[in-house]
Structures are given as C-alpha cells and as structure tokens.
Image (cartoon, rainbow, N blue to C red):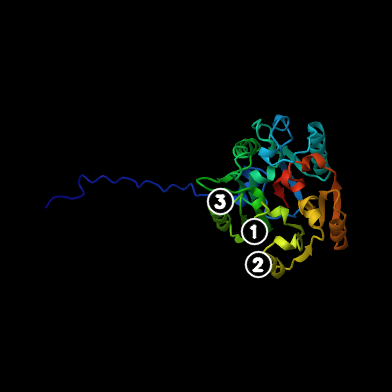
Amino acid sequence: MADLNKDYLDIDSIPGERWFPKETDFETDMTEYWGDWGVCSEVDTLRAVLLRRPGKEVENFDAGAVRFSDEPLDVEKMRAEHDMVADYYRAHGVKVYYVENQREDRPNAIFCRDLMFMTPEGAILTRPGMAARRGEERYVAEALAKIGVPILKTIAGDGMFEGANGMWVDRHTCVLSTGSRCNRSGFEQVKTELERMGVTVYHMQQPYSNIHIDGLMNPASNDTVLIHAPQVPYDIIDMLKKKGFKILEAPSRTEVRDGFCTNFVAIEPGHIVMVAGNPRTQELLENNGIKVDTLEIPEIKKGKGALHCITAYLKRG
C-alpha cells in the first residue's frame, strides 16, 4: 500500500491578523483625533463658537429680497457691534473662530446658527430653506474643515433644515421644529443622526408667523426656560415641565418680536447675554435667579436676528 505521507508537505498556517480594532465610540475619540468639540446642551459652559464677521456681502444688497429691515444699514457700525460680541465671548473664556470666506451676495451669512447644528459627535451641515441663503453653508463647511470639526451629515436630497430649528434639552433629548425653514425630509435626516446617538427627538410645529425655535423659546439654565407662550405647543411645554423645567413666560410680545428677548446666548447655566432694551423680560429672568448681561446691537438686528442667530456653538461643557 502506498505511503500517503511520503510526499506530504506540512505548511504553517497563516497567522491571524492580530491588529485588533480600538473599540471606542466617536464621541470618546473626539478630543484625541479631532479637537475639543461637541454640544448637547444650550446652557452648559460655552467654550467655542463660530462667527461670520460682516464682509462685502453686507455692503450692497436689496433688503427686501433678503428679509432685512428696510432701514439704512450702517455697515461699519454693524461690524463694530459684531466685534463687540466676539470680544464679550473672549472675555468670558470662549474661543472664537470665523467663517473667513463667503459669497458676496449673501448678507444673511452673519447668522451662523442657521448654517450648522452641533452634536456630541460633530456638526450637521444644514441646507437653508430660503433661496437667498442657499449656498452659505458651503463656506461654513470650509471653516469647520479648517479647524478640525467633523461634519457628520450634510442635509441632502429635498431636505431643508436650519440650525435654529434644533434645541438641545439634555444629552438624550432634543427638540426639532418643522416649518418654512425645515421640512419633513430635513427633520428626518437630523432625527436619524440624533437617534443613532441615543437622543429622543421631540417634534415641534413652527407657527406660520415664525421660522425658528429661538424666536419662541430658549433655556437660560438647566431647569429654567423662557418661552413666548402664545406660540409654543403644549406638548413641548409638557415635556419640559416633566423634566423639571420652570417655565418663564415672556411678558411682552413687543420684546419677543421686536426686541429679540428670547434670542439670547447662555454663557453658563444661569448666566446669559441678551439684547439690550428688553426691561420686562430682563426683570423676569433676574427675579428667577438668572444673571443677565446685555449688549446693544441695533445694526445686527436690522437683519431680523440677534445674538443667538449670529452664534454657532462648537463646544459646550
């Protein structure tokens, strides 16, 4: 009988790969590989923001076509106001980054909040609803890439979403609103990203007379929120109450609509900066333990936005 092993060649087995993966999540890796970025609160200590200092885009435009006030705009004063806001942030330990480039036909580009929405894992790049703003987001993407902020998602397809259509409640809760600046497609795209991060999303229907959440509601601390009561849906307030929030109702419609009293920025829990000239709302906040700083920005307000609108958060907490 033939020897079956006579010509048998014993070849060593190929070893296993042994390059085992680093089994950490993106949020954990953020600081090591990208930078100190991330937001899951509207009030945790503000660490870094993205701004657009008014450039050539505000020097010559049709106010009616871009939703600005028809009052004459003092461009240099607008820039000085913007510099004052940036200096205020720096004085409170906030790093200020800028969108350096922009289309020269987009005066609304100063309102950076609308062009991105920050999450614990990085930015969602938005797709503005208004034709006069579409395309601004390209230069925000450029700025984010330059400083190392990861872009998780760019709203695509027929989706529309602006950053002020989102409001963080806590790490696991976020409100997203639909209306003229965010359609159902945009809502679902953002919702999918947030749910992947373990976030419960609450839908808020934006009223016909208003475009963004920050025109109606804004947290001032981890347990206090200022609202424009006639236009915030009951189920949103019910959710906030069940989470332990004290609901402060802005006492003046004029201060909401003309004074932008809800359009403030929290520097830290219980400390905000708001537009000057809202005495009734300021008194209400201060009587409820909120420290209020004020800034005069009459030229910026001619763009029908205020402090919260011009400030895109990059890092909180």
Q: Position of residue 198 (x, y in %)?
A: 58, 60
Q: Position of residue 170 (x, y in %)?
A: 68, 60
- Amino acid at pointer 1: Val
Q: Is residue 200 left or right of residue 314?
A: left
Q: Would you identify the image quadrant in which residue 262 lies?
A: bottom right
Q: In what element is the residue under mark 1? A: strand
Residue 112 higher or lower than 42, as above or below: above
Q: How many marks?
A: 3
Q: Residues within 10 Å of mark 3 (few under 14, many from 20)?
A: many
Answer yes or no: is residue 268 visible. Answer: no
- N-terminal of the two: label 1 or label 3? 1
Residue 241 higher or lower than 78, as above or below: below
Q: Position of residue 218 (x, y in %)?
A: 74, 56
Spatial CA span between label 3 and label 2: 21 Å
Q: Which mark is residue 194?
A: none
- N-terminal of the two: label 3 or label 2? 3
Residue 263 higher or lower than 57, as above or below: below
- N-terminal of the two: label 2 or label 1? 1
The residue depicted at 59 percent of the width and 49 percent of the height is: 161
Spatial CA span between label 1 and label 3: 14 Å
Q: Residue furthest bottom?
A: 242
Q: Is residue 19 left or right of residue 257?
A: left
Q: Which residue is mark 1?
A: 175
Q: Which residue is mark 2?
A: 235
Q: Residues within 10 Å of mark 1 (few under 14, many from 20)?
A: some
Q: Residues within 10 Å of mark 2 (few under 14, many from 20)?
A: few
Q: Which residue is mark 3?
A: 186
Q: Position of residue 203 (x, y in %)?
A: 61, 60
Work out whether residue 8 or residue 297 is closer to the camera in this orientation and state it.
297
The residue depicted at 82 percent of the width and 34 percent of the height is: 77
